[in-house]
Image (cartoon, grey):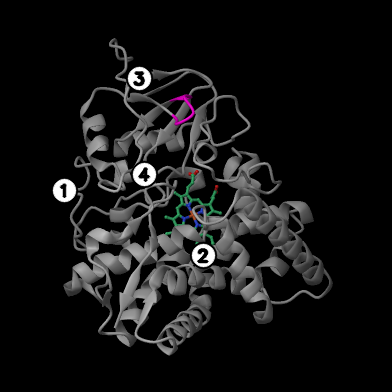
Amino acid sequence: MTTSTDPTVVGFPLRTPEEPLPLSQYASHRARQGLVLSHLPNGVPIWLVTRHEDVRAVLTHPKISANPDNEGFPNVGETMGVPKQDQIPGWFVGLDSPEHDRFRKVLIPEFTVRRVRELRPAIERTVDERIDAMLAGGDSADLVNDFALPVPSLVISSLLGVPPADRDFFESRTRTLVAIRTSTDEQRATATRELLRYINRLIAIKEKWPGDDLISRLLATGQLTAEELSGVLLLLLIAGHETTANNIGLGVVTLLANPQWIGGERVVEELLRLHSVADMVALRVAVDDVEIAGQRIRKGEGIVPLIAAANHDTEVFGCPHAFDPERSERRHVAFGYGVHQCLGQNLVRVEMEIAYRKLFERIPTLELAVPMNELAFKYDGILFGLHELPVRW
Ligand code: HEM
């Protein structure tokens, strides 16, 4: 049934220092019938999807595409100054079935719970080394730059089999990519080129001398061309870096404000839901006329399923803004939903669990070095997080 009334047109949910995640706007959109129509900052119209049920419907609809080559795809990142990587072969998050399935099938074995369990010692070592470095530096640090950003990038570099001597190079280039505020377009383009060149060299080495690492195993499947493999590796690197870092930083803030939960078992899952850092990441376009929530969406119209809105939908999560690791409802969509659901989710869970455990065990007096209301949230990016997090002990 299509709604007979014209859709309500609302502003693009831009973040502000007062509301880094525009959750109150989302609540009023959910209360309206159907969907709301909005515009990207560059004026292109888009449908905003804010109910949990509707977000899942969009992300599993066979006539709704994740491919940015389709006319009308909402390039949210581009309008906010994020470089485009989706033209790179192997950038499979931008492919639909059946092309997408080929990549997913060869990668799934690399991210199973079992494979991630094998990575635990390497993750623990990385986390310990970063804490050692912070402690050696005095009695204060910026937890974003000194811990949350390097940890995921170092973990991915060990996953890929980057030799330890090259990890600093790798870490510094990936850091430039996420530093939207402090790096120029030119610097980010150079960092991408350097990373791709490095990855291609690594692939050539592993082709000649295979080891026990992800690149060697992917090469052995014979399913990907060298060019596709290099795009896949760049995607893993970019998809898993700032997302994880932002979760680590925000999680520390939330745990410091709720110390009774430090060490709690179900904390990670609730932090993922509560912060929903990848709010505007799962972008889509209709490739045929479709209907969502009774609203007709025409072929070529852009759709933005808002992850944070779904994860704060009161129909599913009671008191959604509260941090309650014991809540019984666990169907959050922080990792998306459907065929593109985050490939790295098992890895992230382990990384977050180890990061919080080690931080609070080894630095029990850890505290914020500035008042909570002075924290620099990323209200100017597509991912939610913190620019920096001054702490002391
Ligand atoms: C996809 C969130 C960490 C690799 C996604 C999607 C979301 C997401 C929402 C779906 C995108 C869509 O539907 O268009 C997150 C969050 C993370 C995280 C919140 C951290 C807390 C990681 C890590 C890796 C990773 C560590 C890899 C090492 C990927 C890949 C995809 C993806 C490859 C595309 C999957 C596909 O298209 O089949 N992620 N992610 N992510 N993520 Fe993550």
Say which residue label 4 marks: 307
Q: CA distance from mark 2 to mark 3?
A: 38 Å
Question: Which disc is residue 318 wearing?
Answer: 1
Q: Please, what is the three-letter code of the amino acid marked with disc 4?
A: Ile
Q: Earlier in the sequence, mark 2 or mark 3?
A: 2
Residue 330 or 10: which is nearer the viewer?
A: 10
Give the class, few, some or many, for how many residues have Cα within 10 Å of label 3's Cα (few <14, many ≥20). Answer: many
Say which residue label 2 marks: 112
Secondary structure type for disc 4 = helix
Looking at the image, which residue is at 39% across and 45% down?
Answer: 279
Residue 246 or 55: which is nearer the viewer?
A: 246
Q: Please, what is the three-letter code of the amino acid marked with disc 2?
A: Thr
Q: Is residue 109 magenta?
A: no
Q: Earlier in the sequence, mark 4 or mark 2?
A: 2
Looking at the image, which residue is at 53% across and 35% down?
Answer: 75
Q: Which residues are magenta?
A: 40-45
Q: CA distance from mark 4 to mark 2?
A: 24 Å
Question: Which disc is residue 295 wearing?
Answer: 3
